[in-house]
């Protein structure tokens, strides 16, 4: 179809009008904007660091004393103390039935008396036999002299010799009888002493001063020398904390190091390391640590507790623990530049003091880092830093040209669309 000259001129006019106006409108349109994510930041600071070792365990008796009956098959007549009582050394805790032993003691005394009478009788016999022996010896000597002088007979000498031998045998028998009687007396005395000791043991006494923590003694019970103890004492009432520390921390612990023990349901108690076991359990890879308490009053045995032992103090650069990420390359932090640009740095860590972690290498005091490191923050990305003690406010919207090089626009736009303030 052919257009008339007027129509053609109209089309050309419209085209010229629309074309330049449309191009100018595209140039005047506002630049596409992106949101800059806000993130909480912290400043690496130099401070005093305190190295600690945590220990979990229980309150135990420093020295526990078990008290058993030492009289076999004796009935308990009286129980004089109970759990929770404090007793003195030598104090009577239980009285056992002593009547059978009292009877035995009387029999032993009677046996001693009879034995001493036998000794006295044997002594008298020895005196008589000694006199008889002297007489026989004189008769023998006279008969021997008469025979040598020719005035005596051989038979007389033989009779005198026989009488002398008989007197010697009788004296020896009397002396043996006395020795046997004395031995019986000594035996009876030993038996009496043992009975007296058993009688004394019917009064079951505390061997040391302490606190009664268990009781198995009941009225009428037949006490035995084996089995469960009648009582258990905490010697002098001294209670301490016993816990376990991992093997890698045992080398940091030394006797005398100050610590604080936190018993369950009781106020914290100050103390000091008393003993570090030289042995590590092969199953748990832990070693025993004992802590003496400055104040152990009103602490029940067996109460669970935690202890924190201070092992060192030094100055160091720290950041919040949450600012450090762990990766295959090691520990990482996300350093924030002056313009908000992120830079991931590898660091060497040291002491963990509460929520603060020491940075031995990789950061300097005054460096700013993302307070809660996250893998979606990348190198070169820009953030709006918000100090930890400030409340985040909505991010401003800025043109792309004012925010980052063209290569970063798309990533920042995506981040801005799904922004999250990290605290």
Image (tube, rainbow, N blue to C red):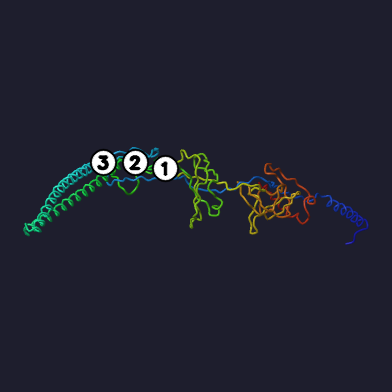
Q: Secondary structure at mark 1?
A: strand
In the rendered image, residue 277, in percent from the top left (x then y), is placed at 49, 52
Q: Residue at x 28, y 39 (%)?
A: 77
As displayed, is residue 217 above or below residue 413?
Answer: above
Label 1 vs 3, first from the N-terminus: 3
Tell which residue pokes out farthest to the front in this image.
149
Q: CA distance from mark 2 to mark 1?
A: 14 Å
Residue contact between numbered discs 1 and 3, judged by CB atoms under 8 Å: no
Q: Secondary structure at mark 2?
A: strand
Residue 98, numbered circle: 3
Badge 1 density bin: few <14, some 14–19, many ≥20, Cα 10 Å: many
Label 2 vs 1, first from the N-terminus: 2
In the rendered image, residue 26, in percent from the top left (x then y), is placed at 83, 52
Residue contact between numbered discs 2 and 1, judged by CB atoms under 8 Å: no
Residue 112, numbered circle: none
In the rendered image, residue 248, in percent from the top left (x then y), is placed at 55, 54
Q: CA distance from mark 2 to mark 3?
A: 15 Å
């Amino acid at each position: 179809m052919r257009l008339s000259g007027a129509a053609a001129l109209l089309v050309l006019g419209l085209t010229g009008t629309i074309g330049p106006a449309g191009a100018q409108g595209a140039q005047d349109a506002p630049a596409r904007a992106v949101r800059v994510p806000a993130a909480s930041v912290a400043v690496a600071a130099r401070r005093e660091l305190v190295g600690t070792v945590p220990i979990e365990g229980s309150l135990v008796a420093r020295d526990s004393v078990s008290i058993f009956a030492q009289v076999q098959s004796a009935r308990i007549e009286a129980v004089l103390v109970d759990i929770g009582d404090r007793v003195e050394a030598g104090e009577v805790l239980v009285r056992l039935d002593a009547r059978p032993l009292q009877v035995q003691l009387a029999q032993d005394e009677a046996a001693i008396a009879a034995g001493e009478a036998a000794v006295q009788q044997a002594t008298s016999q020895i005196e008589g036999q000694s006199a008889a022996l002297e007489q026989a010896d004189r008769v023998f000597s006279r008969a021997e002299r008469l025979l040598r002088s020719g005035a005596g007979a051989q038979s007389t000498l033989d009779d005198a010799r026989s009488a002398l031998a008989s007197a010697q045998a009788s004296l020896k028998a009397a002396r043996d009888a006395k020795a046997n009687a004395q031995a019986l007396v000594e035996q009876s005395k030993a038996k009496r002493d043992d009975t007296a000791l058993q009688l004394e043991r019917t009064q079951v006494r505390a061997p040391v001063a302490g606190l009664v923590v268990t009781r198995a003694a009941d009225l009428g019970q037949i006490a035995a020398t084996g089995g469960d103890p009648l009582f258990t004492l905490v010697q002098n009432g001294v209670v301490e904390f016993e816990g376990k520390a991992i093997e890698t921390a045992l080398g940091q612990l030394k006797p005398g190091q100050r610590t604080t023990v936190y018993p369950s349901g009781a106020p914290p108690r100050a103390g000091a390391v008393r003993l570090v076991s030289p042995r590590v359990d092969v199953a748990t890879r832990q070693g025993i640590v004992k802590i003496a308490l400055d104040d152990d009053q009103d602490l029940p045995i067996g109460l669970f507790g935690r202890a924190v032992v201070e092992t060192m103090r030094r100055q160091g650069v720290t950041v919040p623990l949450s600012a450090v990420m762990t990766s295959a390359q090691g520990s990482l932090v996300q350093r924030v530049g002056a313009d908000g640009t992120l830079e991931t740095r590898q660091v060497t860590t040291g002491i963990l003091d509460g929520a603060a972690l020491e940075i031995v290498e990789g950061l300097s005091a005054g460096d700013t880092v993302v307070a809660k490191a996250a893998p979606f923050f990348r190198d070169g990305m820009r953030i709006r830093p918000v100090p930890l003690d400030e409340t985040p406010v909505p991010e401003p919207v800025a043109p792309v040209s004012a925010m980052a090089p063209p290569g970063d626009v798309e990533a920042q736009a995506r981040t801005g669309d799904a922004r999250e303030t990290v605290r």
